[in-house]
Image (cartoon, coloured by chain):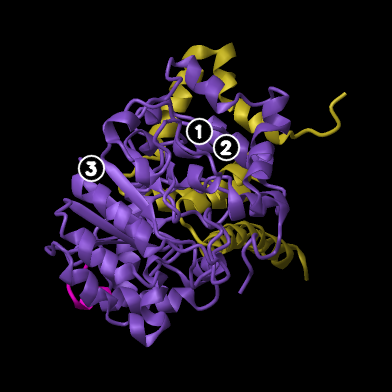
Amino acid sequence: MIKSLHKRKSELANSNRQLEILSNSIFQSGELPTFKHKISETGQFPLKAKKLEILQINVGYMCNQVCTHCHVDAGPDRKEIMTRETMNQCLDVIKKTGAHTLDLTGGAPEMNPNFRWFVEEASKAGIKDFIVRSNLTIITANKKYHDLPEFFKKHNVHVVSSMPHWTKGKTDKQRGDGVFNASIEALKMLNAVGYGMPDSNLRLDLVYNPSGAFLPGNQKSLEKDFKKSLLEEFNIQFHNLFAITNLPISRFLDYLIASENYEDYMYSLVEAYNPSAVKNVMCTNTLSISWDGFLFDCDFNQMLELPVNSKAKHISDYNEDLLEGRDIVISQHCYGCTAGAGSSCQGSVI
Amino acid sequence: MQKTYYDPADLKKFGKISEWNEELGAKFFEYYGKVFEEGALTEREKSLIALAVAHTIQCPYCIDAYTGDGLQRGITKEEMMEALHVAAAIRGGASLVHGVQMMNKVNKLDM
């Protein structure tokens, strides 16, 4: 298993270094337009936050996997975990938010020792869509997690899980040896309690990230291929597939640079820029909360340590009215969300 | 003087072909787009056919384009290589089948 950039003390563990790379060379020379310049062409700068719809909470960077593309740089060696005190502050916000979706992410959120308590408490708030982003393998990783499908069902959690391909080779290459088989087993366990079945209200969606330096294809076509293969080969069912573009930050940026694909990838993103995707980018209706309670426009800005441009910077001084209409903080990584049909934690935006 | 006949950057300029003949260029790209839409064959199947043909006609632009297109569609390297072997088999077979002509000629002339 590879180590996180943080553990390796890689220069890319430093968010400032990542931002420098994203602003220098091809963007500094003017060879490619900056994201600010690009959205200005269509009068979309500054990007403004609309009414909050999705509250995304990152409960910690600890994970049982070390995926090569991970924008969180998560792994077993990451110790940043949301405390019960911060969770309580989040619960206060969850109870009063106007957001229709609560989205728990990580790392592997289930590894936070207070995860189950938090889910139980948060589910009482009656938020319409309660998502937990589960990496699947956590369900089979240890006996203590085997009942997660039942636990999710009890609290009517919407499970969203990563699955980069329907074949072992491509999946294990991105997510680590043995991940494919463990994921298949976990999906079967979720199906067994009713998740992902055609008429079931227990939502099970999969997330597809390209396993290399290329953009995702058409979400609907990929979904069709995933459904066909998983059903025919493993008798597995799920509801929707979200195709998400890999953003050039953290471990994916490290991969792009090491494989000498960085410039070509940035060219692909800029060439695929779609102005219609800009108006629906997730940062305009989402708020991301970090493990230590700070507020960000999205999970990617959280990892780049680009805080919200608002007086309310922490969950302790949360104010939805104050946050609405704020200018979204942008850099060149934002091209990842505006390429082609656009990309968000809920997949394509067009 | 340009040192190579092919420049990868030229692929991105393909659309400029229309600049010197807008009518025919537009008709070609409209046809091209229509051909690759899902029909009796899926877009995925068409992408694999395009990849195999690209190797048969040895077009570096097309190889680049349809390898990337295949990856985006989730086509595996095993599927890509099988498609190429179909192309290679037909191409090789096309040479070899002419051997019948050679054999006919030899059989006619040789004692």
Report the span colored magenta.
Answer: A190-195
**Subunit that carries the residue with mark 3:** A
Residue B56: image location, x then y, percent: 62, 50
Q: Foreground residue, A15 or A216? A: A15
Task: Give left or right: position of A346 versus B30.
Answer: left
Q: Foreground residue, A242 or A250? A: A250
Identify the amino acid type marked 1.
Ala
Which comes sooner in the sequence, label 3 or label 1? 3
Residue A289: image location, x then y, percent: 40, 48
Badge 2 and badge 3 in a common chain: yes
**Subunit that carries the residue with mark 1:** A
Residue B61 has which mark? none
Residue A34: image location, x then y, percent: 59, 26
Residue A172: image location, x then y, percent: 52, 71
Whether A297 is among the magenta residues is: no
Task: Give the letter of the yellow chain.
Answer: B
Whether A192 is among the magenta residues is: yes
Characterize the local packing of mark 3: few (<14), some (14-19) or many (20 or more) Cα atoms within 10 angstroms. Answer: some
**SS class of the residue under badge 2?**
helix
Kindly identify which residue carries mark 3.
A99
Kindly identify which residue carries mark 2.
A268
Name the front one of labels 2 and 3: 3
Quadrant of image for the N terminus of chain A: bottom right
Quadrant of image for the C terminus of chain A: top left
Kindly identify which residue carries mark 1.
A272
Residue at position x 33%, y 68% from top? A115
**Subunit that carries the residue with mark 2:** A
**SS class of the residue under badge 3?**
loop
Which comes sooner in the sequence, label 2 or label 3? 3
Identify the amino acid type marked 2.
Ser
- Colour in which chain A is shown? purple
